[in-house]
Image (tube, helix red, strand yellow):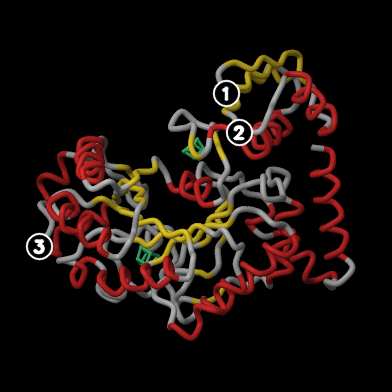
Amino acid sequence: MIRVLEFKKEVRARIESVLDHGAIMEASRDWHAKRNPIPCGMTIHTGISCDFGCLYCYIYDMGFTGKPRPYNLSGLQLVYALTVNPYFTPGIHGTLLAFGSVTEPFMDNTLSRTLEYFRSLRDYLGNPQQVSTKAIIPDNLIDDLRLSVDPDISILISLSTLRHADKLEPRAPPPESRLVFASKLIKRGFHVTLFLRPIIPSITDREIKDILDKASSYNIETIVTGTLRVTPRILKNLEVSRVVDINQLKNRIPENLKPRVQVAIKSSDLKSYIIREAEKRGIKILPASCSANIDSHRQACAACDMGPCGLEEKLPEVDEEGVIGACEALGVRVSQVRIQNNIVNIKCIDKPDKCRVLKHLIISLARRTPKIKITS
Ligand code: SF4
Ligand code: SF4
């Protein structure tokens, strides 16, 4: 724990010695320097916006409507930003990294920045990497990918439909081409998972048998499902597409929609159906994208109630004394630590910000579920 904190400081100092003041300031102000990791880990923005135009995409509601462009930070600046982020833990057992988020990381406009980020983060920090994509890297660049990434990177190939992609994902590569790309990656030794996200009611569920059979025929052995999130704009888009059963979709929306606010639809029945069909075909189902990252790195995680994920025997050993030592090293005051069934219960008597730093450290280094009661 102390070693990890020192390593983070050392990396920051190394980068401070090579970047100029302006670059350091830009990195310090960046979103990556401040944000809390989300459940799938820390999302890494390799670019801004996307021109694939998927009708269900929420980035357009987030204001990312312009021409796609690479993210403004250099690889070194990105590393620096993460080393000043108090919620980020470096190292192979540190914070999970998820590349993509508000762009398509392998689009022509963003690919070279994405490869730069893979290399810089691997070489300086070493955290587990994951990328989700609908794009296809040409054969001659797959070697560049191999040379740039964390060797155990988890690659999620996104797919929601085989039959209606021309309407729902008008400028993304055809689904069959994505599966061919997936099989090439598998042959080159990459860990590939089919990312059934979003599950579009009346589309993905009706096609699921064909999707899973097709995925199996391309040697894909694991899947992750993901829920559709809608806004008024997305709902309208899907209605206009005329391929989605819009009444069924509306019935699945649990609350009134407000402009630009994303609402996850109710889809547990669809997920259960997909899981049953996958099980019939011997396809492994992972509960979340982070689970694929844990799986590809042969680690274990019990940081939420969907777990434990991965190889349980690989869960880091954690005891109350160790957690108290970690709190001291971090300078976070606590009055009680109790560990029960992979849950670390802590009474934190410090400022909420400091308690939050502790929470993310428990998730990353201990890979356990933190339950932190702030009593200051
Ligand atoms: S490829 Fe991804 S980022 Fe691009 S439009 Fe589709 S869902 Fe959005
Ligand atoms: S337990 Fe599994 S689903 Fe939960 S955070 Fe860990 S890897 Fe993700």
Q: Is residue 48 above or below residue 355?
A: below
Ligand 1 positioned in quadrant: bottom left
Disc on res. 269? none
In the rendered structure, which amino acid carries the disc numbered 1?
Asn
Comparing labels 3 and 2, the label whose residue is closer to the camera: 2
Residue visible at 68% across and 62% down?
121
Q: Which image quadrant: the N terminus?
A: top right
Disc on res. 242? 3
In the rendered structure, which amino acid carries the disc numbered 2?
Leu
Q: Position of residue 153 (x, y in %)?
A: 54, 59
For mark 2, give the secondary structure.
loop
For mark 3, give the secondary structure.
loop
Q: Residues within 10 Å of mark 1 (few under 14, many from 20)?
A: many
Q: Pick the residue in front: 243 or 195.
A: 195
Q: Which residue is mark 1?
A: 342
Residue visible at 87% across and 55% down?
10
